[in-house]
Image (spheres, rainbow, N blue to C red):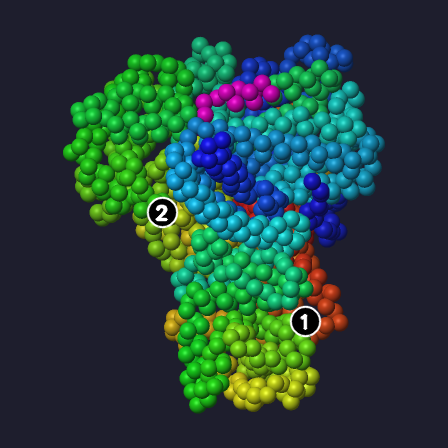
Amino acid sequence: MELAAALRIQLERQVSHWEAAAVALADPGSFASEGAWANLEQYLNRAVRASLELSTRTLRTEITGLRTQLDNAKLGPELVVVARRLQRVRRQYGQVETVVSFYADAVNTRTNPTLGTHMRALDRIAVTSMRSALDPMGRQVPPALTYVDKGLGAAILRAGVRLWDGRRSPAAAIKVTRHNLYRPTALVHETGHQVAHLLGWNREAAAHMGKVLVDDPQLSLLWRSWTSEITADAYAFAHCGYAAVAALHDVVANEIESVLQLSPGDPHPVSYIRVLLGVEMCRRYYGAGPWDDLAAAWTATHPLSQAAPGVAPLLERSAARLPELVDALLARPCTAFGARALTQLVDPQRVSPAALEQLAALSGPALFTSAHLAEKEQLRIVALTGLRIATDPRKTIQHTEDLTRFAQVLGARTTVSLAA
Amino acid sequence: MTWTTAESTFAEYEYGESEYNEAELGESAPEVTTEASSPFATAGYSESTWEQLPETPEASTESWEASQPEAGELNAISPFAHVQAAEDREVLAAEFVNEMMGTELSEALGELAQEWSGVHAEVSSNGGMGVSTPALHEAGLLVTRHADELAAEVDRFLETMAEQVGEHSASTIGEKELASFLEFTESPPIPVGASPAQEQFFKSLGRLVGRVARGAVNLAKKGISLVGKIASLPFSFIFKNLGKIVRPLLRRVLTWAIGRLPAPLQPIANQLRIRIFGNEAEFGSESEAELGELVGEHGGWGSEQALAQELEGELAWHGGIPAVGETTELEQEFVSAVSRYLAAENEAELAQLEAELNATTAEYEAAPGAAELDNARVVLVRELSELRDGESPGPVIERFLPAILPALRIGVRIIGRRRVVNFLADLLAKLIRPLVGPQFATPLSQALVDVGLRIFTLETNAEDRELAAPSAVASIVEDTVRRLAEQGNEVFVDTSRLHSETVAAFNEAVAHTVPASLVRGDLDARETSGTAQATWVLRPRVYWYRKYCRIFEVTLTPQMAAAITTFGGVRLADVLRAQGVRTPVKVRVHLYETLPGTYLSRIAQLEKGVPGLYPNGWRHLHPLSIAAAGILLGEPGLGADVDPRFTRDRSLVAAGQRFFYLQLPYAGGGGVAVSTPSQAFVTIDARAGRDLIRLSIYLSEADAQAIASRARQHNTTAFVIALRAAVGAAVNSLRISPRTRVKVLREVSAEAPAAAAAGVASKIIEKIVDRLVDAAIRLAMDYAKAKADEFVRAADNPANGVSVLITFPIPGLSTVFAGPLTGFVAIARILSAILSHRAGVMTVPGLRRY
């Protein structure tokens, strides 16, 4: 067979192969069950599907163009050009497949109806936590898609970031760890990242901390490098109070070496000081409380003498500056929040232990079963159950069941009104 | 699919508090009306087993007509060939109808229609990009698949019901077993993955199944023989075969959802009844006599039917032409069919019933479709855009009219008269000619592009801009014809009248569609003050509804919200409070107008750029009455008042009806939860041995929790004040919309089965409601002091909201209601009894209407 003809056949086969593969990618039902898709809120369902549809359509358009080019190619050099274009299509397919697989895996965690309802509740909690800062600033709240995955820490793929195929993500995709499904304060830490990104909070927060630590350039540099994680921690504290701090403690309470480790370039603060920062936030807004015991146990269990050389002094100096740093994060007006402090938009007093117990007393058992209260007090309920787990751990199963009941109510489908 | 049990609405049956024995069969009062219908008069089935029943004063707007079967007819079918059997069947049928109404099936069917219509709209319009024949076909297949899947679930559901009741029949089931079964049917297992509309449908179906069982047992207790009837067989058999009646019902809803415009279900005489007397007609023996007199007076008509046929379409559509199918009619037909099924005596009757239902459904499936109208609109717009300079638009309009006229319920006799249609087409062509000429078309197009297209947040393209002016002209044509149609067929008969009315209608349509700068300043029909350029614009590419091209920025105050009434007579303030929305609040107000074939879900599906409305926010659309427009926007002219049946619930709207949507500051990301607002219902139970009036005050979950929290603080004063305020708000719905919230139950007897559904005059209902409301507010305070714990327990229940049931014993009520309710003394006796006798009060979780 003539070489050009032989080459054409190989190209024909490959183009057809990728054409068929692209068609398969276009059907959302082929990579996540319809039941799982149905467990997304409709608006989120449509946003994600529309985005995937666009991605796959772009790919198919490119393959159609490739097909046309192949059909029109007559000579050997033209076929070589087609072959090069085919390579680009292969790469593009890989990128689109990565995006599709990511969302497929996320959506598929909802196949189980009960878990699906729970995740839908977490979607709503995520959106509500973003709304508290974005609404007053007149900014649109992005959809949130939570999913379950293994590991210790939560994560977020922010809405609007460029995905592997170059398109912008249609929703904030937030990973929730299995061990924290029923204690989801980390969810708010992650939405804090999204809010900080949208409002440009990190830049300002870094500048404020720089001013506070102007007399200690080394510390200033260090703390400013941790800004993105600190602001997210502050965001979680403002919404969930001590529950967020206790949950953070339980995630980072690793081997002592890990707790005291300073990793250059790591945006996460040293765990030791990170927990103490959360404790300081509690002291600042709530006075004395169980966080004092946490701090005492934490520092006793992780003596600075065990830290690597040079780290202990940094941590000691940091500990002395925590009150100022908390003030800079939570009480300093920011342009990002319309010349207001974060705590003016999200009042931590609403999730103080006293306020949460009052909520429980006034609401009675209905707090975890009422659709109205679930909608209205969703973040405070998360804070309350987290607080109770933190301070009354022997009844963790009961507190977890309370959270589960609440999540099943919040994540339930929109109920139909029988009259108006 | 697996099954999960929905949360129980009735966790407790604590009837001990009342002085009256409400514990019969575990239920306090049957929750049904007493209506029956002949479902097949329009389908060529000329005779029915139903007695003619006048209207009762509640939401359903149609009254029923049937004629007495000849004894011989039954003899031909039934093995029990005697007249007594015929009377028993009437009583049996009436009793079942009595039991089965009030299952909220019409609301559930309305929700299904909305859901399927929304799905159909999304696919058939290619996501709003434009209707195409392949897309229409695909959409039809998709929705049909949904309906088929639902029908299969219904079969499984009914089997579950059958398994639950076991092999019991009406004569063998004990009271405890029946009570247990009824409790099960009130919270039936809902198929996992059911949509909200499907969930509501299954709940209604569960209730209906329970009522069938209870009705059969009641009849047996009354000594009505069920022997030889389906109703005497084991319940398991009865329930399993109910699917044969449910399937045609679902197909009917499907046809509406995909755009088959429904022919009126009711016989002509019933339509006549509504159009003469209106929705809230004081039907009863008086109006029956009036109609009879009318027949007698005019002579020449041998029967009411003949009179009605003669007058068919002559009367105006006061208050609006239905844009979509009316599910209350469908519910009544379904209930009637189930009653016939239960009264059937052999397989042949069952088969005949099934065949008739399927035949009627097939007629619906063959009816002209909104899809044809949708296509016709697209063609109209395109052909108007392609008119050459000086070319007459007459032929274009001539081709359009046959699509729009049936959609506007214009009679076949008119549509069939070529002369009339041509006259109208010529006249319209003359009227719109200036609009399609370049002198006007260009500035019109410019004005609309500047002002109108942006409102839809579409990425408008060159074609959209080119079609802006022709779309407006098409909208004017359709609007003009609608306004004519609302005046009844008679306007089409007299050409000089048709001419003048068409010009008047055209002027109004122009004033509503063309920007003010292009309209004469002295035109009375202008809707807004000043020189605002905003106007109503047809949704580009699909042409299913109109939107006002100005979004109003409004600060909604508590006072405004309290003064605006929405569906069901509920105040907007109560709706917002149930949703957790606090006022004052800044909102953006979007305005919409429906066209024939428009379900509200279609609007929501296409308003992709409106947070909270897309895709399922149609439940947040509220009627824009003249009053609401004045209060909310300061522009009463933008509102439209319609017949009250179009403001009962969202399942039935009128063509040309207007709505507003409040875009809240946080409407995105999931939107605002839909929650049933506080409202009230009344049951007047005038059956022998009952003699009571019950007021059911439903408090929304938001209200209930707020009140309960005060009780938990042991702050009695605060609790009383909160309860009194919530009760006061709830009973407002009664004052505003009493007829839709009052059910009257009368005894069904062999002597006078018809008396069971006799109507009660509006004035009497209003007086009773007024007295009840006064009593309720006083009782609320006494109750609050004594029964706070009961309230808190009900609020703790997972069911949404609580219902406070106040039962007033009215000795002799059944006697008073046995005859015509006209005597002053009789009414005074009822009103006095409401105050003088000690009422029983109790609180139950969830919504209990009756």
Which residue occupies 73% across, 65% down? A398
Q: Magenta stretch?
A: B358-371
Where residue A296 appears, as percent x and y from the top left, is 66, 85
Magenta span: chief secondary structure = helix
Which residue occupies 62% across, 42% down? B194
- Of the residues shown, which amino acid type is indicated by label 1? Arg
Q: Is residue B133 magenta?
A: no
Secondary structure state at the residue bearing disc 1 = helix
Instruction: Decide which of A271, B468 is in the foreground and name it.
Output: A271
Q: Which residue is mark 1?
A: A388
Q: Disc 2 vs disc 1: which is toward the camera? A: 2
Q: Chain of mark 2?
A: B
Which residue occupies 22% across, 30% down? B436
Where residue B670 appears, as percent x and y from the top left, is 51, 53
Where residue B130 appears, as percent x and y from the top left, is 39, 35
Instruction: Decide which of B808, B845 is in the foreground and name it.
Output: B845
Rendered view: A392 above or below A26: below
Q: Which mark is residue A293?
A: none
Q: Please rate how many residues cluster around mark 2, counting C-alpha atoms within 10 Å: few if below 14, some from 14 to 19, many from 20.
A: few
Rendered view: B420 above or below A161: above
Instruction: Decide which of A330, B500 is in the foreground and name it.
Output: A330
Q: Chain of mark 1?
A: A
Describe residue B169's horizontal placement relative to residue A115 as left or right.
Answer: right
